[in-house]
Image (spheres, rainbow, N blue to C red):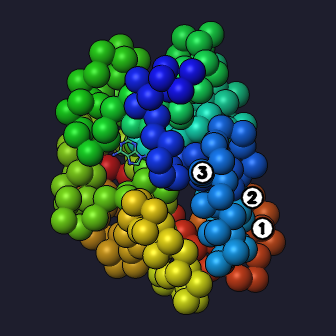
Amino acid sequence: MADELATRGIDFDRPNAARVYDFLIGGKLNYAIDREFAERILEVRPESRDLALLNRRWLRRAVRFGAEQGIRQFLDIGSGMPTVGHVHEVVQSIDPEARVVYVDNEPVAVAHSEIVLKDNNNAEMVQADAEFPDTVLEHPTTERLLDFGRPVMVIMAAFIHFVPDSRNPAGLIAAYRDALVPGSYLALSSGTFEGQGEEVRRAAELYRKSGTDVFARSKEELRALVDGFEILPPGIVFTPQWRPDDPAEAGERPELASQLALVARKN
Ligand SMILES: C[S@@+](CC[C@H](N)C(=O)[O-])C[C@H]1O[C@@H](n2cnc3c(N)ncnc32)[C@H](O)[C@@H]1O
C-alpha cells in the first residue's frame, strides 16, 4: 500500500497543505503527519478552522454568483479535496449541464476527486501544476469539457498565496486571463496579514518551516495581481464580507477570517 501511494507521488515526509486544510474543515482525507501539524497551527491560531470554513462558504457564494450571471463553465485551480458543497455540486444544482474542471497537483486530492466525480459527465479532475497554465489549458480534459470561446469562471480559492512574487503570480493570473473571452470571471481568495495579529504570522512561519511557504498579500497587492479584470462590488474584502447571504454572517470581526476575497470580470 505504501509503495502504491509512493508511486502516486504521495508525500508522507511532510504535512501537505491540501490535506492539512481538509483536516481543518473536518474532512477525513488526511494523514497523521497532517493532523499533527494542523494541531500545532490550531494551538498558535485557534481560529484557523473557521478561516477554512469561511473560505469554503465564500467560494460557494462566489460560484453561485457566477452561475446567476449565466456562467456554465468553471475552472477551479488548486481545487483541493472534494469536500461537501464542492463547486460542481453548487453549480450543477443550478444547471446540471454546468461544466467544472478541477485542477490540483496533490495526489490524494486528485485520487479522491476522481472517485467522487466518476459518474459525473460534466465535471472532471486534472492533475497538473497550475503554475504551468499551458499544461492546464491544453490538457485533453480541459479541452473536452470547456469551450474557451464562451465565458468561463476561473477560481483560485486559497491558492495564489502559495505562489511567491519571485514566480510572478501576476503573470500567472494574466496567462489564465488571456485565455478567457470578455464576460468571463475570476473568483480569488488569498491569505493576508492585513488586520491580523502576531499569531497569524506565527502560523505562517510554521507553514514555512514545514516546507510550504505562504505569501500573504494586502488588498493593494491583490488588486495589482488581477490587473485587466474589473473587480466587482463589494471589492476586495474579508471572505465573510463578500455578499453574505445574511448581513449578520459577516460577524463583528470579519478580519478573523484572515483571507481576502474578490470576484472580478473580464470586460
Ligand atoms: C488551501 S487549499 C484550497 C482548496 C480549495 N481551493 C478551497 O479553497 O477550499 C490549496 C490547494 O492548492 C493546491 N496547489 C498548491 N499549489 C499548486 C500548484 N502549483 N498546482 C496545482 N495545485 C496547487 C494544493 O494542493 C491545495 O489543494
Q: Nearer the viewer, residue 116 or 153?
A: 116
Cβ atoms under marks 2 and 1 closer than 8 Å = yes
**In the rendered structure, which amino acid carries the disc numbered 2?**
Asp
Percent position of residue 190, x then y = 46, 64
* Ligand 1 within 8 Å, label 1 CB: no
Tell me the residue at 59%/84% (across/down): 199
Q: Secondary structure at mark 1?
A: helix
Q: Is residue 169 left or right of residue 202?
A: left
Q: Nearer the viewer, mark 2 or mark 3?
A: 3
**In the rendered structure, which amino acid carries the disc numbered 1?**
Glu
Q: Name the N-terminal-most of marks 2 and 3.
A: 3
> Dot 3 corresponds to which residue?
33
Characterize the local packing of mark 1: few (<14), some (14-19) or many (20 or more) Cα atoms within 10 angstroms: some
> Dot 2 corresponds to which residue?
245
Q: Nearer the viewer, residue 125 or 254?
A: 125
Tell me the residue at 19%/55% (across/down): 171
**In the rendered structure, which amino acid carries the disc numbered 3?**
Ile
> Dot 1 corresponds to which residue?
249
